[in-house]
Image (cartoon, rainbow, N blue to C red):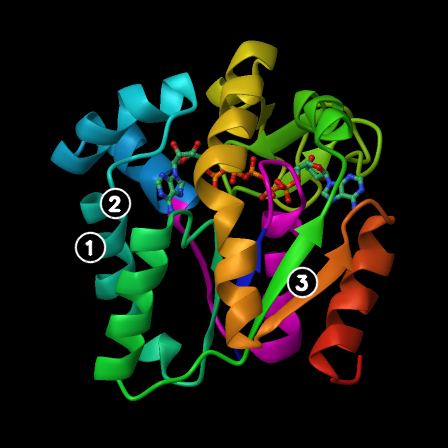
């Protein structure tokens, strides 16, 4: 399965990608996760990305295109991948098309998670992530068994730096301006399916599998 998950910040791309990884046995490629690791480790790429991420702006196309091109060459992508948060601009989508052509690979599908932007602000404000293993939670919709503690590894749950309301609103504005055009871009290619991302998490997963025409 070679799949792109499109949607605004908080649409549920990461949540669904993790479930699809289990279903299809292919890796999740999240440019946001890769960039956050680089920021934490203080690599040159991380230092370059940090100010963009903190303000809710996009990291320059050449940086993320380089990340994804390198990641797609790894052995675990041989039978597919779930792209989460990439592409995010038309130049990134064009670069991906070229990269896949060179690799003689075709995308199977693009899923656009359709959501209410205002509801996402509340969704993101309630998001918590495990500092140790990266597992995702939501204070209301996907709470951990014990407050502040990861169910999987016992790690501490933290709030992402860019999940403050002002930054969330900047991220939404950037999405509408730079990423939304990709819905039309992939619509023209015939690969796009729209899925209601406002349903409960499990129902969204089922709707994605239906759109992909695969069994549970
Ligand atoms: P990134 O990490 O990609 O953030 P994002 O796109 O803003 O997406 P999020 O991770 O916030 O949301 P999500 O859709 O994954 O939602 P989630 O599943 O977590 O990017 C961060 C930054 O990195 C960018 O701002 C940019 O600076 C940079 N960057 C990354 N990629 C880039 C690129 N390609 N080009 C340039 N710059 C790039 O869900 C959110 C919460 O809601 C969770 O708590 C979850 O439990 C809950 N939830 C999920 N689904 C549901 C549901 N159906 N109902 C109720 N709650 C739900």
Picture coordinates of residue 94, whole percent (x, y): 31, 63
Rounded to the nearest whole Å, what is the CA distance between mark 3 and mark 2?
Answer: 28 Å
Q: As displayed, is residue 105 above or below residue 91? A: below
Disc 1, SS: helix
Q: Quadrant of residue 150?
A: top right
Q: Residue at x 81, y 51 (%)?
A: 201
Camera-nearest residue between 161 and 40: 161
Q: Residues within 10 Å of mark 3 (few under 14, many from 20)?
A: some
- Tag nearer the camera, 3 or 2: 2
Q: Residues within 10 Å of mark 1 (few under 14, many from 20)?
A: few
User: Which quadrant: the N terminus?
Assistant: bottom right
Picture coordinates of residue 60, whole percent (x, y): 24, 38
Disc 3, SS: helix
Which residue is disc 1 drawn over?
66
Picture coordinates of residue 93, whole percent (x, y): 36, 60
- Tag nearer the camera, 1 or 3: 1
Disc 2, SS: helix
- Is 24 included in the stretch rendered in magenta? yes
Q: Which residues are magenta?
A: 7-31
Kindly check if marks 1 and 2 are in contact, taking CB atoms under 8 A apart as contact.
no
Q: Earlier in the sequence, mark 1 or mark 2?
A: 2
Q: Residue at x 19, y 47 (%)?
A: 62
Question: Could you tell whether 44 is left or right of 59 in the image?
Answer: left
Q: Earlier in the sequence, mark 3 or mark 2?
A: 3
Which residue is disc 2 drawn over?
61
Q: As displayed, is residue 178 above or below residue 7? A: above
Picture coordinates of residue 22, whole percent (x, y): 63, 70
């Amino acid at each position: 399965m070679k799949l792109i998950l499109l949607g605004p910040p908080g649409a549920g791309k990461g949540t669904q990608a993790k479930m699809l990884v289990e279903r299809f046995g292919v890796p999740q490629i999240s440019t946001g996760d890769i960039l956050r690791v680089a920021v934490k480790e203080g690599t040159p790429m991380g230092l370059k990305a940090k100010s963009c991420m903190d303000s809710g702006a996009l990291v320059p196309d050449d940086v993320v295109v380089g990340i994804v091109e390198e990641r797609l060459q790894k052995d675990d992508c041989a039978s597919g991948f779930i792209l989460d948060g990439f592409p995010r601009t038309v130049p990134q989508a064009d670069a991906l098309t070229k990269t896949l052509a060179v690799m003689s690979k075709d995308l199977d599908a693009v899923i656009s998670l359709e959501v209410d932007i205002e509801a996402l602000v509340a969704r993101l404000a309630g998001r918590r992530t495990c500092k140790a293993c990266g597992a995702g939670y939501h204070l209301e919709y996907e709470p951990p068994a014990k407050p502040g503690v990861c169910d999987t590894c016992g790690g501490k749950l933290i709030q992402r730096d860019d999940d403050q309301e002002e930054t969330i609103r900047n991220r939404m504005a950037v999405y509408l301006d730079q990423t939304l055009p990709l819905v039309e871009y992939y619509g023209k290619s015939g690969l796009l399916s729209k899925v209601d991302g406002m349903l409960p998490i499990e129902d969204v997963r089922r709707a994605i599998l239906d759109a992909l025409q695969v069994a549970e």
